[in-house]
Image (cartoon, rainbow, N blue to C red):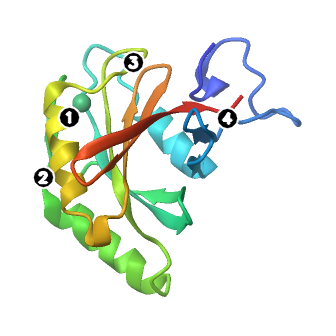
């Protein structure tokens, strides 16, 4: 089983009509959902670190907030100035920031900053201590204390969590 692009796997039915794409993640109590546009999931899949030589990737998550829910419609991908290794990704803020600002303006202030994503070279990714510290800090910097969405793209699954005012609110599971 895998949540990311069956397209690359042998025997896949991707592209056939009626194929179901997993695109929603929810908290255990179903109070918060994160819905990813297919183009976002395809991009995540492209940055999986399937080969030993693949470096970590990452960027910002952009989209709309609908009440407590996250509608992730866009994302930024690594810029040449980002620092990338097998086990680390440090984004250089300027490129990601200016793309996010441009989309915010061109969308009439509808598509805004939701959080951050990066990849891990593991099947079922879990946050590192560095990730946790970064998200705790990032969530304290959100305007009006808005919740912050954190995604790790693993080789098979995503880790999706929500952070607010310096603490983790919940992990989200995929909706099958
Ligand atoms: Zn990480």
Residue 30: percent from left, percent from top: 63, 41
Q: Which residue is mark 2?
A: 81
At horizontal 25% and vertical 73% (from top left) the residue drawn is 98
For label 3, the SS is: loop
Q: Mark 4 Cα within 10 Å, few/some/many (few <14, many 20+)?
A: some
Q: Is residue 99 visible?
A: no
Tell me the CA gap for discs 4 and 2: 32 Å
The Cα atoms of the two marked residues, 1 and 4, are separated by: 25 Å
Callout 2: SS: loop
**Depicted 113 relative to depicted 6: above or below:** below
Name the residue beneath numbered marker 4: 22
The disc at residue 95 is none
Which is more N-terminal, label 2 or label 3?
Answer: 3
Q: How many marks?
A: 4
Quick check: 5 above or below 145? Answer: above
Kindly check if marks 1 and 3 are in contact, taking CB atoms under 8 A apart as contact.
Answer: no
Q: Is residue 130 visible?
A: yes
The numbered disc on residue 131 is: 1
The answer to whether residue 103 is left or right of residue 3 is left
Question: Which residue carries the number 3 mark?
Answer: 50
Label 4 element class: loop
| Separation (CA) of disc 3 from disc 2 | 23 Å
Query: Mark 2 against mark 1, which lies toward the viewer?
Result: 1
CB under 8 Å between callouts 4 and 2?
no
């Amino acid at each position: 089983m895998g949540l990311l692009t069956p397209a690359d796997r042998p025997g896949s039915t991707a592209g056939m009509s009626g194929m179901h794409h997993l695109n929603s993640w929810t908290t255990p109590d179903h109070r918060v959902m994160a819905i990813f546009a297919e183009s976002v999931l395809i991009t995540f899949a492209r940055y999986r670190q399937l080969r030993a030589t693949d470096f970590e990737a990452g960027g910002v998550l952009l989209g709309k907030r609908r009440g407590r829910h996250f509608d992730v419609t866009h994302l930024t991908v690594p810029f040449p100035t980002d620092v990338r290794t097998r086990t680390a990704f440090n984004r250089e803020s300027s490129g990601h920031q200016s793309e996010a600002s441009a989309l915010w303006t061109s969308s009439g202030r509808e598509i805004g900053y939701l959080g951050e994503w990066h990849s891990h070279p593991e099947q079922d990714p879990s946050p590192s201590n560095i990730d946790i510290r970064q998200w705790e800090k990032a969530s304290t910097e959100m305007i009006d204390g808005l919740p912050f969405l954190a995604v790790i793209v693993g080789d098979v699954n995503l880790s999706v969590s929500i952070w607010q005012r310096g603490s983790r609110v919940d992990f989200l599971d995929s909706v099958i």
